Amino acid sequence: MTQPPPEPGAPVPDGSPPGAPAPGSPAYPKPPGGHSGESTSESHRVGTTFPCAACGAQVRFTPGTSELTCPYCGARQAVPVDEHVVLEEHDYVAWRESPHKPTGVVAQHVLVCARCGASVDSADLALLCPFCSAPIIAEIDPHEQVIPEGVVPFGLTKTQAVESMRTWTSSRWFAPGGLKKVSTAEKINGTYVPHWTYDADTATRYAGMRGEFYYVSESYTDAQGRQQTRMVQRTRWWPASGQVLRFFDDVLVPASTQLPSDTLQKLEPWTLQRAQPFRADYLSGFQALRYNVQPENGLTIAQGRMRPIIEGDCRADIGGDVQQLTSVSTSYADITFKLMLLPLWVASYLYAGKPYTVYVNAFDGHVVGERPYSIPKIVAAVIATVVLLAAVAFGYQYLDRPSSPTSPSPQVTRATPALPTSARPLTPSSVPSANPPLDPSGSLPPTWVR
Ligand SMILES: [Zn+2]
Ligand SMILES: [Zn+2]
C-alpha cells in the first residue's frame, strides 16, 4: 500500500528540498541508510540513494553525460565509465541447472522515499516518488531477480526527446494539420526497459530441394489467331542436404511484457557496444522495469529470431535458383545470456480526445509510435489518384482510336478543374464533377471528350 509522507507538508512539490536548508547548511534530512541502501524492515526498504554531497538532496543521472546532477544546487558527481567494456554473460545451461538461480518473481516491494518518507508500493526497479518526485531505486535481491549485467545510459534529454517527437509528428503522411501543433507531450517518462541478449553457436542439418530454371519454347495462339512461340520458364528439382554453422551474438529479446514487444523491436537497433556495466547511478531520476519474461522463455523467442537467418543460410548453401526446405534441425551450443537495461522516453499525447503513445529510443532519438490519420486527406489523395489514373486511361483510349467516331453523342466541353489540393478536405459535393464520374463499373463514359 502506498502511503503519503509522515511529516506535515506532504506532498512536497519538486522544486526545492523539503525544509529548504540555508545555503551551505547541511540541514537537509539525511536519508536513513546513507549512500548504500539499508532495510528498515523486511518489507520496507529505502533502497539505493545518491545524496548530493553539498545539500543532501537526491542527485539524478544527466542524459548524454556521465554525471549525476543535483536538481537543487547544481552540484555534479561523476559516474565511473569503463572505456573497454566486456560485459559478463551467464552460461545458460549452468544457470538453468543451478539450484540457486533467482526465482524471477516480480513482487511488489514497499519502498521508502528517502526525501519525504512516503511508503511506495512498487514492482519497479526504479521510479520517481509519486509525492515528491525524488528518485527511488530498489535494491535487487539476487534470490528474486537476475541483476542486470549492463545498461545503455540515457543519451537524450527530455527536451531532445520532445524535439524528436515533434519532428516525427510533423513529418507524418496523412496526419491531421492540427497534429503539428501538438508540440508538448502531455506526459513523458524516461524508462529503462529490460532486454535479454543471447549468444549461441548453432549447427543446422537440413534437407530440401534445389531448383534450377530452364526454358522451353512453347507455341500458342495470339489474340489475332496467329500461331506464335515463346520461351517459358520451368524448374528442374534436385534433392539437397547438408549442414550450416553460424554463431549468433547478442540476439535481443524484450524481457518485459509491459510494453508491446513489436514496438520495442521497431526501436532497434540498439548500440549495445555503448553499454556500461550496470550501476544503480544510471537509474537515478528514471523509471526502470523489472523483467517478467524468464530467461528460458526469452531463449525460445531468441531462437525464433535466429530461425529465418538459419533458413537463409540453408537456402544459400543449397544454391540454385529456388529452394525448398523439408527439414531443418538446429543444435545450440555455448548459449550465454545477459540482462540489459535500455533507455526509452515514452510520451503520450491527446489528439481529438484520443490518447496516443510515442516511444523514443533515448540513445539515438529514433521514434516509433501511434498517430492519428486525417480521413479527409486520405479521401482527397485517393480521389486524386483515381482521377489521374482515369485521365491516363482515357488518354490511351483516345490515342488508340484517334479518328474513330465511336461517340457521336453530344460533346461535353467543360474544363477539367485542378486536382484537389491535399490540404483541402473534400466533401462529396466538392468532388470535381467534370472529371470522369467514378462509375462503379470502372469504365469511362464513351461520350466524354476533352
Ligand atoms: Zn545539491
Ligand atoms: Zn517522496
Image: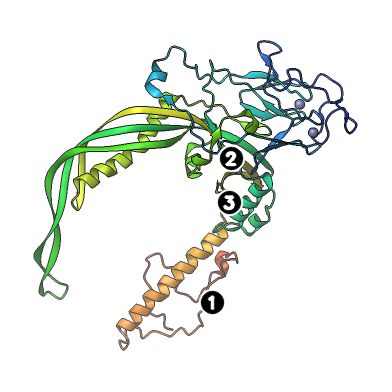
Label 1 environment density (alpha carbons within 10 Å; few <14, some 14–19, many ≥20): few
User: Mark 3 or 1 closer to N-term?
Assistant: 3
Mark 2 burial class by Cα count in 10 Å: few <14, some 14-19, many 20+: many
Q: Which residue is mark 3?
A: 372
Q: Tell me the SS state at disc 2.
A: strand
Amino acid bearing label 3: Pro
Q: x, y percentage for residue 95?
A: 42, 19
Q: Position of residue 116 (x, y in %)?
A: 79, 24
Which residue is denoted by mark 1 in the rendering?
418
What distance separates the C-alpha of mark 1 from that of mark 2? 46 Å
Q: Secondary structure at mark 1?
A: loop
Identify the element where label 3 is drawn.
Answer: loop
The percent position of residue 121, horizontal first and vertical second, equals 67, 21
| Callout count | 3
Dot 3 alpha-carbon crowd within 10 angstroms: few under 14, some 14 to 19, many 20 or more: some
> Image height check: is 193 above or below 349?
above
